[in-house]
Amino acid sequence: MDNRNLTLLTDFYELTMMQGYYKNQTDPVVVFDAFYRTNPSGNGYAITCGLEQVIDYIKNLHFTYDDIAYLRSLKMFDEEFLDYLSGFHFTGDIYAIPEGSVVFPMEPLVKVVAPIMQAQLVETAILNIINHQSLIATKAARVCYAAQGDPVMEFGLRRAQGPDAGTYGARAAVIGGCVGTSNVLAAQMFDVPALGTHAHSWIMSFPDELTAFRTYANMYPENATLLVDTYDTLRSGVPHAIQVFKEMRDAGKMPVKYGIRLDSGDLAYLSKEARKMLDAEGFTDAVIVASSDLDEHLIDSLKTQKAAIGSWGVGTKMITSADCPAFGGVYKLAAIEKDGVFEPKIKLSENTWKVTNPGNKTVFRIYDEQHKIKADLIALADETVDENDKLLLFDPIETWKKTLLQPGEFTVREMMVPVFKGGVCVYQSPTVKEIKAYCQQELNTLWEESRRLVNPHEVHVDLSAKLWDIKTELLDTFHTGM
């Protein structure tokens, strides 16, 4: 994405709608919300990610001479409109929940407040960026949770859907909890650790396995992790690795970090047997690394089987989020400014979860006395929540389900922060390492019941009474015609 003009990274209908607004001389300031409806992978939460790339996109938003020439060649756009596009730049406001935050369905992750032509144009790119990185960050958080504190390395570049997915997916995976990535470009771009060992081809290129191990360990004594399953894991690979470690120990050149990697076979059985063999020779601190089509469910199963694995390399199923390949985020009109006031708009549907929340909104997070998330509250942007007053939470669908919180029983945090004001960026993106640390703090505000991999406890997202009243009034208006 660096140094690339992504202005045409948009759906064609965004441009045809823009021309329609332009020709009809209507360009009111509007509010659009980017949100999602269902947690991916059956999860109890999601991790929002990609805001830094959204910022870069908005900053560089402009139509080049070649862009205009291409649009002219389509024979769809008037010269007057093309002239408008040639001077286009973003002048609106953007608010967002910071990257690395734990988030839940239906709450705005990004809010765009801008003239409708501008707000319409940026829809596709914002969704493309936020959907992809949020999906991978969430998947990585699940994988790292299953690993129970063991380091998880992101190994997915060669299986990702293209260079951008591999590079920005690696960024998201590190934010979600991975200790580093095999993707050297991502490591360079985002200043995160570049990690990896060697391939089976290294072993096969030497006359024998032992020579390959010796050569590699001598070249990289600071981190000698040897891949032991090229020929026969227990009868060849592990014994040869142990022989190399003995030679280095006897020579007083014991590696700082060392161990073996398993990339095939019954990982539970092989790791236990390898652990016995290593321990018997005094190499109790040798790390056993596992790879081979891992995901959170397989890691969880291996943990249950007490596999002797201390580090995990996870590739295909994390970088592609194999069980849930799309985040499903949407971008919906929520309000139109009229006479200086935002008039709420609502989208109806036969499906309850597709009915949108109207108005210019913000999100409050309600914590209990242990600083665990009690609920999230979507409210109008001009509302406040006072910790010194009682707070009544209620389910916006099953409204009889209510919780009354007394002062002192809860704390409040407004989640959305200003990112652009009047087209100028007012937000400083943290580093990837800082976002990762923040993400771990965020994950710690979840109860374990909401983090479990199967049937997690649902964290409720409620509406303020004022917002609920507006939504109900709009629904009644459409149904009664009044």
Image (cartoon, rainbow, N blue to C red):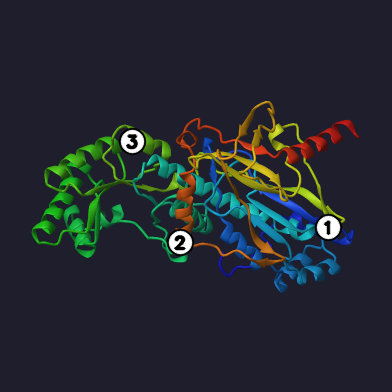
Task: Check the picture and name the quadrant holding the N terminus.
Answer: bottom right
The x, y position of residue 286, in whole percent, is: 21, 49
Q: Tell me the number on the disc at residue 302.
A: 3
Amino acid carrying mark 2 in the image: Ala
Q: Residue furthest bottom?
A: 65
Q: Which residue: 89% across, 61% down?
A: 25
Helix, strand or loop status at disc 1: loop
* Amino acid type at image mark 3: Leu
- Discs 1/3, front: 1
Give left or right: position of 38 versus 434.
Answer: right
Label 3 vs 2, first from the N-terminus: 2
Q: Regarding mark 3 in the picture, which secondary structure is present there?
A: helix
336 or 362: nearer the viewer: 362
From the top left corner, tell me how far across and down residue 465 is, in percent: 72, 37
Q: Which mark is residue 28?
A: 1
Is 110 located above or below residue 273 in the figure? Answer: below
Dot 2 corresponds to which residue?
186
Q: Which of marks 1 and 2 is nearer the N terminus?
A: 1
Pair 1/2: label in front: 1
Instruction: Kindly identify the residue that appears in the image at 15 percent across and 43 percent down.
Output: 279
Image quadrant in which the C terminus is located: top right
- Residue at figure coordinates x 66%, y 32% from the top left: 395
Alpha carbon separation for disc pair 1 and 2: 40 Å
Q: Which residue is drawn at 70% across and 72% down?
A: 64
**Spatial separation of the CA atoms under disc 3 and disc 2:** 29 Å
